[in-house]
Amino acid sequence: MIGYEVATHYLASASSDGPPGLLPAREQMALSLGWHIILACFGVAFPTMIYVVHRRGLVRDDPVALGLARRWAKVSAVLFAIGAVSGTVLSFEMGLLWPGLMGRYGDVLGLPFAFEGLSFFVEAIFLGIYLYGWDRMPPRRHLATLLPMGTAGVVGTFCVVSVNAWMNNPTGFRLVGGKVTDVNPWRAMFNDGVWLQFAHMWVGAFMLVGFVVSGVYAAGMLKGRVDAHHKLGFMVPFVFATVAAVAQPLIGHVLGLRVGDTQPSKLAAFELATTTENPAPLRLGGLLINGHVRWALDIPRIGSLIARNSFHKAVQGMDTIPVRDRPPMNITHLAFQSMVGIGTLLAVAVVVFWVARWRGRDLLPNKWFLRFAVVAGPMAIVALECGWVATEVGRQPWTVWHVLRTTDAASTSSGLWWSYAGAFVVYIGMTIGAFVVLRSMARRWRAGEMDLPTPYGPGAARVDEPAEPGR
């Protein structure tokens, strides 16, 4: 949300006229949200993938699919535990770093944050039931516990995205004499931009998780582990990633059309449009240096088509925006084009894979394709991060569009650099911890340990014990 206004030179210059807490607040929020958003994607998409392989295992009596479900559930538990820490840090940061936002608009934003907290608890409860329900619950009832778990993850993400959508489309209140009145939290939560923005994030989550998980199994196949376990482990998330990669450009296009109507300065930064152009070209690459666009490749009329859905409509230039209301163009433009470029490459790659498969040529054994599949995961992460950088930096200098400036939202404390340093150490520690734990789990699975123990869980049921009634 607020914290994606990154890039050191802009932040330093933009913070020179603001309160002393502005720069560290931006840096800390960028770190926290940029780190947490990856875990949030797994909370949205991973339960659905686990459900698919678990159901396949039950319906087809497939031990490979059931084994995948068990393993993915363990991984999900590790990621959820780490996400709980980073999410808790974020909840404190909102008030600590941005008192001008939460102090004035807390009543407006309270409802989605409350629902997000409830969703977190529901997700945690059913994740625990699912983990400890193996061999202890009727199979279909056990499978059904994934439904509320996955739903809670989606609802929680919707609530957080609704806050960000509100910051881009503020509604549900009135300002009278500088005070917030007539608060309608439902209207604020279900603002005009929430559905498109949530759809973009929801599909992006499946794209990220699908490519990351399939990349893990692609790496295994590159090392010679070409078995049913790795093939199924690759194919299920890759199918989800395929659908997401193809759908995402369409959703992004519709969302971009709305940005042109509601936030013309952001669109001008996306397109690196210094002046109003009719028709506008698609500007690939380029930087704005001393007021002039350098090193850009212009494709005539395509800019108008993408931004305005017409070959003839104008794209409003930054020269129509007051200087004090302009976002940093270079950061926004490069982040936007990186997101679009990576997304387009991934969409083309999955289409090529399935077309080749349809024509009788399976690319899965191809080492060059497997190498691409391995790097597709990090590429999807970069695309997601760049998308948030583009939308958040492009909204500057506003925290709440045309209502609250970022300089007025930030803390006036001069000691926030200590908070940032502490958060940095915490996130480094969690990153190392996650890597060590997941790597250890993978090694033990490869060594033949089929079912790793779940912390604080009851011992595994013995197969020679008589089943209790109802088990």
Image (cartoon, helix red, strand yellow):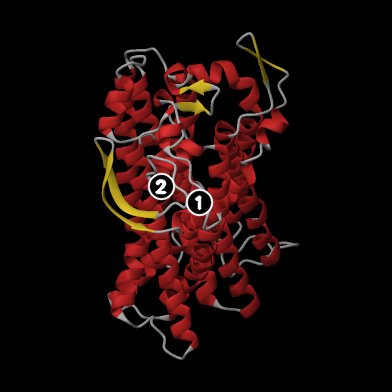
Q: CA distance from mark 1 to mark 2?
A: 8 Å
User: Looking at the image, which residue is at 47% across and 56% down?
Assistant: 74
Q: Position of residue 375 (x, y in %)?
A: 32, 63
Q: Quadrant of residue 54?
A: bottom right
Amino acid found under the numbered disc labelled 1: Ala
SS of the residue at dot 1? helix
The single residue placed furthest to the bottom in the displayed view is: 360
Which is more toward the observer, 313 or 17?
313
Which is more toward the observer, 204 or 121?
204
Is residue 441 visible to us here? Answer: no
Query: Residue beneath label 2, please?
Result: 271
* Tag 1–tag 2 contact (CB < 8 Å): yes
User: Looking at the image, which residue is at 45% across and 59% down?
Assistant: 302
Q: Which mark is residue 155?
A: none
The single residue placed furthest to the top in the displayed view is: 177
Q: Position of residue 95 (x, y in %)?
A: 49, 21
Q: Quadrant of residue 103?
A: top right
